[in-house]
Image (spheres, helix red, strand yellow):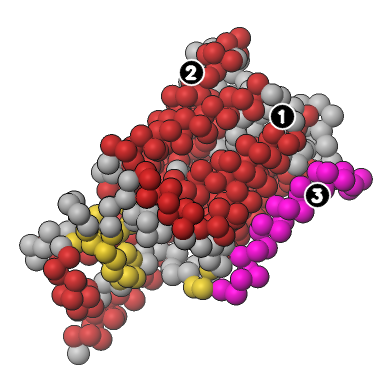
Amino acid sequence: MGEHYCVVTFHSTYHAIQFEKIFSGLNYDVKLMPIPRQISSSCGTAATFPCDMWDEIEVISQSYNIEIDHLHRVEPTGNKKWFRGIIER
Amino acid sequence: MGKEKRLMLLAGAIIGIFSVVLVKLGNPVNMGICVACFIRDVAGALGLHKAEVVQYIRPEISGFILGAFVISLGTGEFRARGGSSPIIRFCFGVFVMIGALVFLGCPLRMILRLANGDLNALIGLFGFLAGIVVGIQFIKKGFSLGKSYKQTMANGYILPVIAVSLIVFMLIRPAFINFSASGPGSQHAPFAIALAVGLAVGILIQRTRICTVGGFRDIFLLKDFHLFWGLVGIFGFALIGNIIFNPTAFRIGFVEQPIAHNDFLWNFLGMFLVGYASVLLGGCPLRQTILGGEGDTDAAITVLGLLVGAAIAHNFGLAASAKGVPLNGKIAVVIGLLVVTVVAVSNVYSIVSKNKKERAGADV
């Protein structure tokens, strides 16, 4: 996933599945994954997408009635940063 | 990814070892940690049921909630939120507890039983996995309990305050709190150690999000093994710990297993109900206590559902024992399966119709 990656979160897993189905059909490089820990303490489903598609994701989702929660840019974390995350928040 | 996997294994290993240590220090065998059994004991201690052998305020439960509460406050993740189908969650909580008490353990105890050679837990695991797979089919079709919304802070503090109240009851032991004189309720690790372990586990699970349901759900739904490694850690290290610390209790087989019965069908169906309802709830009983601790009032209501479910299970004669599963318990599991299915089908139907209407509206 390189230096950083982008994910979209949803209010329901169903919308995450719909998102993957529709965007894969449109040949976008999207993939379902558990919500990254840096974003949320919940254990829902998110989807990765190419960061340069940031603006399009929202518009296309809306046109297909896919309810998205937020778009996030996720920086990579190692154990050290994970721990630092605990004390610095 | 390698580091994350090791971290999950380590967290699971700590929980597995803690479970073995609690048994060594007095908890019933294979019950180092069992959220269903512990909440059932708390229900008995509060006088919500009259089963005299399972009444004790398990400090581990308060520990799970308060561990998650304290760490989430510290990291800024504590958020009071709720309003996502609370009454359905309460109902599902009741049935999760009934399923667990027919099998005799929550999914975590199922893993711990397996790690001590109890093969009845393997049958339970098959049922649990089957329940998760069926639940996932509804999720794929559109099942959702709906968005949760931000609430005022006081909402999020209710469950932690209940957890503190239980500790106070434990310390001052008022006459209205029941304590078992014999049976599993009378077997417990020292209060301070049990509370400390509960706090540590609460913190660990809040940070790692280990969940017995989530671990398998993510494999089936996303082909993702991240949470599963935590479960591998729990199983592997509880197994090693049992062999080292409690070798006399380690026995591979189906018969004469501690606090277990070997009725295959009802071990399977009991855990089927637990997996089925839990995957629709979005987490196992342990995970619900953690989410409840970090301000999720929907999870808090699910925990109250578990508590009431325990009272119902013992007052109505539904809970199994080493002798087997009573008829009432079998009927209750079937009712549970029907209720969860009716709720899931009606939920999917409503959501799909709503989506169709919205799409039609958008096309006009």
Inter-mark Cα distance, 1 to 2: 20 Å
Instruction: Say if labels 3 and 2 share a chain.
Output: yes
Q: Amino acid at mark 3?
A: Val
Which image quarter is the N terminus of chain B in? top left
Inter-mark Cα distance, 1 to 3: 18 Å
Residue found farthest to the left: A27
Residue B48 in picture, x, y percent from top left: 77, 49
Query: Which dot marks residue B168?
Result: 3
Instruction: Say if labels 1 and 2 share a chain.
Output: yes
Per the rendered image, the range of residues in magenta is B151-177
Residue A45 in picture, x, y percent from top left: 33, 57
Give whichever of discs 3 and 2 has the lower sequence position.
Answer: 3
Residue under numbered circle 1:
B189
Query: Which dot marks residue B240?
Result: 2
Q: Amino acid at mark 2?
A: Ile
Mark 3, chain letter?
A: B
Q: Residue at x 73, y 46 (%)?
A: B43
Inter-mark Cα distance, 3 to 2: 35 Å
Q: Is residue B71 left or right of residue B224?
A: right
Q: Residue at x 52, y 33 (%)?
A: B15
